[in-house]
């Protein structure tokens, strides 16, 4: 019986694979063999696939469809240990006050159309960003907020002058840290564009080892450019995969079946049970860690974000009440099946962050792993709400809460299901509002069109505290309905506490990395977050990313963590260069 | 006993049919024709549907339905005696097993199955009421009113309901069961409108209607007191067909993850199962049992529909 069931499942999965790959069939039928192709999973639809203007891309899909993994290359890559690896650049130096930075570019880099990549491209790209406010991708908004001017020193040297000192200028702007970074565009193409905000950059041109072959809403196909500058100059050898396919698989079941049937080489996160089931059917499938919990800690801890302009969540007491009611351990156990850990602070729990986390916890602002529902309810009652049956009421109004959640992943919706239950049991009529990925990032978050949302907008810091803390300062506050710059402070937290917080964070921002005073200042600033709770950190983001070693070996693992396993980020170049054919 | 009286009363009309050559069983079935409502298909169909309603009612009395919520039990438990992938054997604590977040499948069915039926019945009731009103008005009144209603229903019938509903519900995010039923009702009134209009058009010229009109009866009286009762079996059939369509539509939306988020329905259970890799994890009880229950529901509705057809049309009855 099990054999026939397995056979049935295999045929179903092959049929599913054939269906999904059907539209790519014409191209696949060409001469690239499966064993020369690496297929990466995409967890969202490529809306507007013909548009390659990453500077107007709020959702990231115009880069993670393969463009910044294969076609565009970063200036630098930031390692988990804080080290910076130069890629298109060879180095960068600042003056003593950290407000003038001189960037050196690598010699011999060319765009895929043969034009040379040089300082003109960088200067042109930065100038365009400074002059065009409609370019609104997070990395673009960040750069525009920091850079005062840029100038060409010589063919391979560029000088940035900042508005104010920033010792982290490289990691904040030029290095791939958690997803993307400022990526220069070719001047010889973009200078022809009438309006950079509406320019689609199609056909796209990059410096990377892959060029676009074909793209649709559900997949992108990239083929290796054997004339890539990196191999020609001896920088690195060509990557082994001849073809890179980024495929929207559409859900956990589909990605699991494709993985089991060897139709996928790296899958987006799946739940523990699904991973075990895939492994049972295909022993060639592995994860970042060889044993439980198998997962990799994504640098973006999950949190609940309040729109602090919407009653009753404009009250700090009410927000703190919710924080008391949430049971992080239950989220870990049910939504993550034990594969992650509760957040103690807003920060990712990487070793390089431990000093700051400890400072916050020692100051008494750490978050508990379990709930104190009675304390939460007491806070709610102190605000004049009384429990009537299932829910709290005040002036005839029921205490309810709509939580917007991106429906792209089971991880997100399942976490919110757990939180909704916790709040319901405590007397709050909470409900989840699942929203499609593009709407969530495009409409809901940046414009503050939510009451409460589930996201990871503290995400940024991996080895210093400022990048995350700087996202909640009063500098980023705009009215509801206007776009929050770079998704910063989308909850519009803007009180006296915000001002006090901002002052400390700004002071911290100009201090050199590693200054011994920083942990103390982090704790001092954190008192305002703890008191007003503009967002509630939930759990660390564990991603269980199955990779298939049937065709490709050399994926990042805990034994060889040369890169994060997050193959949707701009540093995936390092993974592609490290893959070797298994057969 | 009543049957005998009826039989003798009916005897002159049936003119003593030739019973020779019929077996005892066939004779028994012949007698059953005397009460068309004792139709086996109708009875079986109604029994199936009633069993689902009974599951909902009795289940609430005898089972802890709060277990429909996340974290009520150990995740991924199989039904009693069934081993899951981790080698744990299902127990009576969750006779039909649990899903990956520990929701009890039996509790989900107790709450979910009547909910699915409720959406279908409510949507169909609203749609039928609208259809009856518009169909009668169009057929009986004629003229401009008829043109408007006819063209309106013809246009609406060409619009694929699922497409519109997906867009509407995706925009709303979360809606109640009743709201969902109302939305579906917007797309199930056209067929009854057209069919009733056609029936009314043919009935309008019949003798008893003309007589009523001559007697000065009002339009409302003629439509709803004289003509409507003649359409009752037919309307029932149409109603049941509409319930089926509405449930299919509702389940279709739920399986896509639309519709109510926290209220269990059969479609929602299947959506969660698909979305959490239930197939690859071999959690067949998670998607299989609700699917089977839906099948029971549809078979029940189909049988009732066939039965009602036979009730209203004696020529369909077979020996």
Image (spheres, coloured by chain):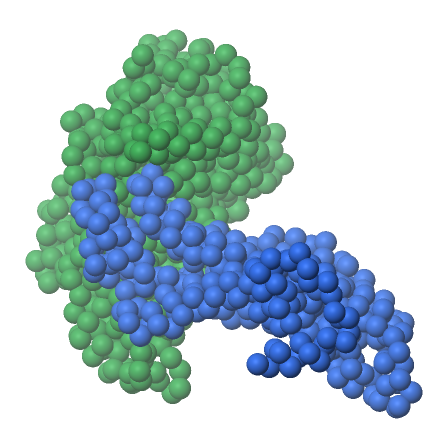
Chain colours: A green, B blue
In the picture as drawn, the residue positioned furthest to the bottom comes out as: B216
Q: Residue furthest right?
A: B214
A217 above or below A446?
A: above
Please give the name of the residue rendered at 28% of the width and 72% of the height, measured from the top-left corner.
Answer: B62
Is residue A292 placed above or below B160 in the rendered structure? above
| Residue at figure coordinates x 28%, y 69% from the top left | B63
Is residue A468 in view?
A: no
Where does the image place residue A4, in percent across and percent down from the top left? 35, 31
Where in the figure is residue A36, as x and y percent of width and height?
40, 15
Side (left or right) of B223 relative to A69:
right
- Name the spot of residue A422 as percent of width and height, x first: 26, 66
Q: Is residue B43 above or below residue B164?
A: below
A490 or A415: nearer the viewer: A415
The image quarter containing residue A190 is top right
- Quick one: quadrant of the N terminus of chain B? bottom right
Q: Image quadrant of residue A14? A: top left
Placement of A433 over or under A297, stated as above or below? below
Evaluate whether residue B194 shows in this view: yes
* Residue at the limit of the structure toward the front, as seen here: B20
Q: Nearer the viewer, residue A265 or A208?
A: A265
Write the residue at 47% across / 14% down: A32
* Residue at the image point whose x is 85% and y is 80% from the top: B209
User: Measured from the top left, where is residue A366 in percent x and y?
Assistant: 14, 59
In the foreground, A308 or A42: A42
Q: Nearer the viewer, residue B206 or A574?
A: B206
């Amino acid at each position: 019986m099990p054999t026939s069931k397995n056979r049935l499942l295999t045929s179903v999965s092959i049929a599913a694979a054939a269906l999904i790959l059907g539209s790519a069939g014409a191209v696949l039928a060409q001469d690239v063999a499966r064993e020369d192709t690496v297929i990466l999973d995409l967890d969202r639809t490529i809306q507007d696939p013909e548009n390659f203007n990453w500077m107007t891309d709020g959702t990231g899909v115009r880069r993670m469809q393969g463009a910044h993994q294969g076609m565009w290359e970063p200036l630098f890559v930031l390692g988990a240990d804080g080290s910076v690896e130069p890629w298109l650049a060879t180095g960068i130096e600042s003056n003593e006050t950290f407000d003038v930075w001189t960037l050196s570019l690598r010699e011999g880099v060319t765009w895929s159309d043969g034009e040379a990549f040089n300082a003109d491209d960088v200067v042109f790209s930065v100038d365009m960003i400074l002059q065009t406010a409609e370019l609104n991708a997070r990395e673009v908004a960040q750069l525009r907020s920091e850079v005062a001017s840029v100038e060409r020193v010589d063919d391979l040297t560029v000088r940035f002058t900042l508005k104010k000192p920033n010792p982290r200028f490289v990691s904040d702007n030029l290095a791939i840290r958690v997803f993307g970074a400022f990526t220069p565009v070719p001047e010889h193409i973009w200078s022809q564009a009438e309006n950079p905000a509406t320019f689609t950059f199609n056909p796209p041109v990059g410096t990377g080892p892959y060029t676009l072959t074909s793209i649709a809403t559900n997949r992108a196909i990239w083929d290796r450019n054997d004339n890539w500058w990196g191999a020609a100059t001896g920088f690195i050898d060509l990557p082994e995969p001849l073809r890179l396919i980024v495929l929207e698989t559409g859900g956990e079941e589909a990605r699991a079946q494709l993985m089991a049937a060897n139709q996928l080489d790296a899958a987006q996160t799946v739940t523990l049970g699904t991973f075990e089931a895939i492994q049972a059917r295909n022993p060639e499938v592995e994860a970042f860690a060889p044993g439980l919990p198998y997962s990799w800690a994504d640098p973006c801890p999950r949190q609940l974000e309040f729109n602090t302009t919407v009653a009753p969540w404009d009250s700090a007491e009410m927000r703190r009440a919710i924080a008391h009611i949430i049971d992080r351990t239950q989220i870990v156990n049910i939504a993550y099946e034990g594969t992650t850990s509760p957040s103690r602070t807003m920060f990712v729990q990487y070793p390089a962050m431990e000093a700051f986390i400890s400072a916050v916890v020692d100051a008494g602002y750490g978050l508990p792993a379990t709930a104190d529902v009675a304390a939460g309810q007491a806070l709610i009652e102190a605000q004049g709400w009384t429990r009537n049956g299932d829910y709290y009421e005040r002036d005839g109004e029921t205490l309810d809460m709509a939580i917007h959640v991106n429906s792209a992943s089971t991880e997100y919706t399942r976490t919110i299901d757990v939180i909704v239950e916790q709040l319901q049991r405590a007397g709050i009529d909470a409900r989840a509002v699942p929203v499609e990925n593009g709407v969530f990032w495009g409409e809901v978050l940046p414009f503050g069109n939510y009451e409460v949302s589930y996201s990871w907008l503290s995400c940024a810091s991996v080895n210093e505290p400022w990048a995350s803390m700087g996202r909640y300062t009063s500098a980023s506050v705009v009215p509801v309905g206007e776009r929050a710059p770079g998704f910063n402070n989308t909850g519009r937290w803007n009180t006296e506490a915000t001002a006090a917080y901002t002052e400390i964070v700004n002071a911290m921002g100009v201090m050199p990395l590693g200054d011994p005073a920083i942990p103390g200042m982090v704790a001092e600033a954190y008192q305002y977050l703890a008191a007003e709770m503009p967002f509630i950190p939930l759990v660390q983001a564990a991603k269980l990313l199955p990779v298939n070693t049937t065709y490709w070996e050399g994926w990042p693992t805990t034994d060889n963590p040369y890169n994060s396993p997050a193959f949707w980020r701009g540093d995936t170049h390092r993974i592609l260069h490290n893959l070797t054919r298994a057969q | 006993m009543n049957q005998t009286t009826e039989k003798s009363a009916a005897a002159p009309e049936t003119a003593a049919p030739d019973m020779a050559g019929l077996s005892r069983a066939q004779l028994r079935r012949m007698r059953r024709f005397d009460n068309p409502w004792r139709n086996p298909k109708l009875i079986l169909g109604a029994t199936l549907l009633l069993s689902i309603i009974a599951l909902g009612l009795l289940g609430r009395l005898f089972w802890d339905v709060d277990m429909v919520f996340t974290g009520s039990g150990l995740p991924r438990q199989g039904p009693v005696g069934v081993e899951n992938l981790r080698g744990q054997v299902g127990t009576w604590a969750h006779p039909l097993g649990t899903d990956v977040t520990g929701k009890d499948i039996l509790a989900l069915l107790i709450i979910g199955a009547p909910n699915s039926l409720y959406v279908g019945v409510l949507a169909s009731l609203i749609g039928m009421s609208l259809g009856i009103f518009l169909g009668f008005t169009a057929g009986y009144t004629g003229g401009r009113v008829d043109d408007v209603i006819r063209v309106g229903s013809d246009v609406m019938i060409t619009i694929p309901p699922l497409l519109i509903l997906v867009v509407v519900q995706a925009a709303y995010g979360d809606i109640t069961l009743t709201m969902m039923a109302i939305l579906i009702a917007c797309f199930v009134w056209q067929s009854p409108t057209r069919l009733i209009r056609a029936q009314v058009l043919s009935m309008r010229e019949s003798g008893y209607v003309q007589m009523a009109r001559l007697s000065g009866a009002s339009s409302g009286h003629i439509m709803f007191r004289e003509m409507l009762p003649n359409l009752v079996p037919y309307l029932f059939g149409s109603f049941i067909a509409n319930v089926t369509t509405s449930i299919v539509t509702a389940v279709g939306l739920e399986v896509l993850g639309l519709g109510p988020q926290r209220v269990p329905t059969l479609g929602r259970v299947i959506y969660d199962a698909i979305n959490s890799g239930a197939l690859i994890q071999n959690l067949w009880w998670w998607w299989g049992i609700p699917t089977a229950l839906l099948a029971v529901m549809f078979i029940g509705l189909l049988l009732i529909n066939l039965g009602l057809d036979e009730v209203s049309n004696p020529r369909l009855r077979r020996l």
